[in-house]
C-alpha cells in the first residue's frame, strides 16, 4: 500500500498549520493514500485551537498501523517532544526535535519503497545551531541516503527548473561550476525525468552562467571552457540537451512549451521565474536519491503561523505529486 510521511518542519512556522487545515479539506479523504504525520501530538492540538479547528489525534506507533485518512483526524507518530509549541517565534530548544523528526522520516522512506516523504518548511538557521554543516533538506537527504550526488528541482504544471548549485553565496558559484558537476546534474535530470515523470525523451535546456551565456567569451569563459564541453559529452550519450543559452530569453512562451526542464547554474537564476509564474502552486522535488521526496515551495512564514492566513496549495500539490511518483 502506498503511504506518505509528512515531516512538518519548524514548529513555530506554518508547517503544522498546513496539515491541520488540509485534514479538514474535502480532498483529505479523496487523496486515497494514508498520511503519517511525524511530530508531537500536543503541538497539533495546541495549534488547532489557534486555528479554531477541532482536530483529533490518532497516535501511531508504527507505520504499519496507518489507516485511511478521515476528515478532522491526524495520524501522528511521536519521536520527540517539542520543547516550545508557540507559533511565530523560533526557539533553539526545538532544533533537535525538528532534526529528529526529519531523520526518522527519511529513514522510514528509505526502507520502504512504497512510501514517499513530504516535507514542510524548516529554519536552516535553527538546525545549524546543533548541526553546523546543515545546508538544507536536499543535502541532508543526500547525506543520510549516502547518495553520490543530488539535484534540487522545483516544479509546477507550467515549468520545471533544476539547480546546478543550491544555497551558496554568488561569489562561490563560478568556483563550483565544473565539467563533472554539469555532467552529473544533466545525467540525474535526464534519468529522473524518464524514471519518475515517465518522459521518454526529455528535452533539457541549460542556462549559461554569465549574461548572454558569455557572448562567446566576451563576458566570461565558463560557457566555453566548462559548460559547453560537458554538454557535448552528454550529447554523445543521446541526451537531448541544449548548448548554454541566455537566461534572459530562455523562458519565452515558445521555449516553455518545448522544454521538459531547465538546468540553471544557481538558485536565484531560475527560482524567481518559477515563483513569478507559479508561486503557491509549485513544489520542490529531490532528484538523484533513492527516495521520493517532495516539499512546499515556501518558507516557514512566522508572521502568519497560528492564523488561518496560510495557503495550503503548495502542500496539496506536494502530496499529490508524491503519490504519483511512488
Image (spheres, grey):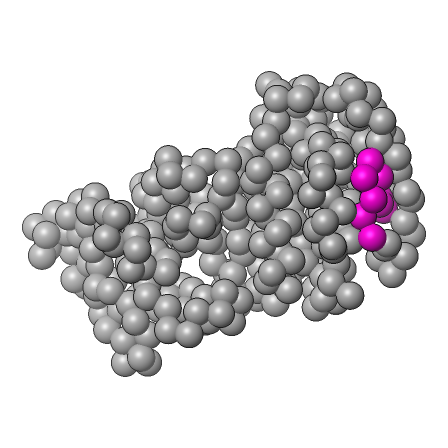
Q: Is residue 238 above or below residue 109?
A: below
User: Picture quarter containing residue 26?
Assistant: top right
Location of the N terminus by quadrant is bottom right
Q: How many marks?
A: 0
Q: Is residue 277 above or below residue 3?
A: above
Q: Is 62 a magenta residue?
A: no
Residue in view at x 73 percent, y 63 percent = 2
Magenta stretch in the rendered image: 68-77
Coordinates of residue 171 in the picture (x, y in percent): 32, 41
254 relative position to 48: left or right? left
274 relative position to 192: left or right? left
Q: Is 73 a magenta residue?
A: yes
Coordinates of residue 87 in the picture (x, y in percent): 71, 21
Coordinates of residue 290 in the picture (x, y in percent): 61, 67
| Closest to the observer, 220 or 256 | 256
User: Picture quarter containing residue 71?
Assistant: top right
Amino acid at each position: 500500500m502506498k503511504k506518505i510521511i509528512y515531516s512538518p518542519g519548524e514548529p513555530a512556522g506554518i508547517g503544522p498549520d498546513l496539515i491541520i487545515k488540509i485534514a479538514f479539506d474535502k480532498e483529505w479523504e479523496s487523496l486515497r493514500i494514508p498520511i503519517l504525520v511525524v511530530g508531537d501530538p500536543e503541538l497539533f492540538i495546541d495549534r488547532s485551537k489557534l486555528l479554531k479547528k477541532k482536530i483529533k489525534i490518532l497516535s501511531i506507533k508504527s507505520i504499519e498501523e496507518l489507516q485511511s485518512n478521515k476528515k478532522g483526524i491526524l495520524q501522528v507518530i511521536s519521536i520527540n517532544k517539542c520543547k516550545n509549541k508557540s507559533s511565530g517565534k523560533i526557539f533553539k530548544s526545538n532544533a533537535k526535535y525538528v532534526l529528529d523528526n526529519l531523520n526518522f522520516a527519511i529513514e522510514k522512506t528509505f526502507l520502504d519503497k512504497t512510501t514517499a516523504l513530504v516535507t514542510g518548511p524548516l529554519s536552516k538557521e535553527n538546525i545549524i545551531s546543533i548541526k553546523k554543516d546543515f545546508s538544507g533538506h536536499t543535502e541532508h537527504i543526500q547525506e543520510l541516503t549516502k547518495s553520490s550526488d543530488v539535484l534540487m528541482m522545483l516544479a509546477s504544471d507550467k515549468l520545471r527548473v533544476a539547480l546546478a548549485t543550491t544555497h551558496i553565496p554568488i561569489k562561490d558559484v563560478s568556483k563550483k561550476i565544473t565539467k563533472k558537476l554539469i555532467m552529473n546534474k544533466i545525467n540525474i535530470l535526464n534519468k529522473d525525468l524518464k524514471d519518475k515523470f515517465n518522459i521518454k525523451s526529455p528535452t533539457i535546456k541549460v542556462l549559461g552562467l554569465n549574461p548572454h551565456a558569455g557572448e562567446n567569451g566576451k563576458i566570461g569563459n565558463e560557457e566555453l571552457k566548462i559548460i559547453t564541453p560537458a554538454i557535448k559529452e552528454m550529447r554523445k550519450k543521446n541526451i537531448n540537451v541544449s548548448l548554454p543559452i541566455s537566461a534572459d530569453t530562455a523562458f519565452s512562451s515558445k521555449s516553455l512549451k518545448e522544454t521538459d526542464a531547465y538546468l540553471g547554474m544557481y538558485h536565484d537564476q531560475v527560482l524567481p521565474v518559477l515563483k513569478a509564474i507559479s508561486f503557491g502552486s509549485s513544489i520542490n522535488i529531490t532528484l538523484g536519491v533513492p527516495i521520493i521526496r517532495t516539499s512546499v515551495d515556501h518558507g516557514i512564514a512566522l508572521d502568519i503561523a497560528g492564523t488561518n492566513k496560510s495557503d495550503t496549495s503548495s502542500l496539496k500539490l506536494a502530496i499529490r505529486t508524491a503519490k504519483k511518483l511512488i
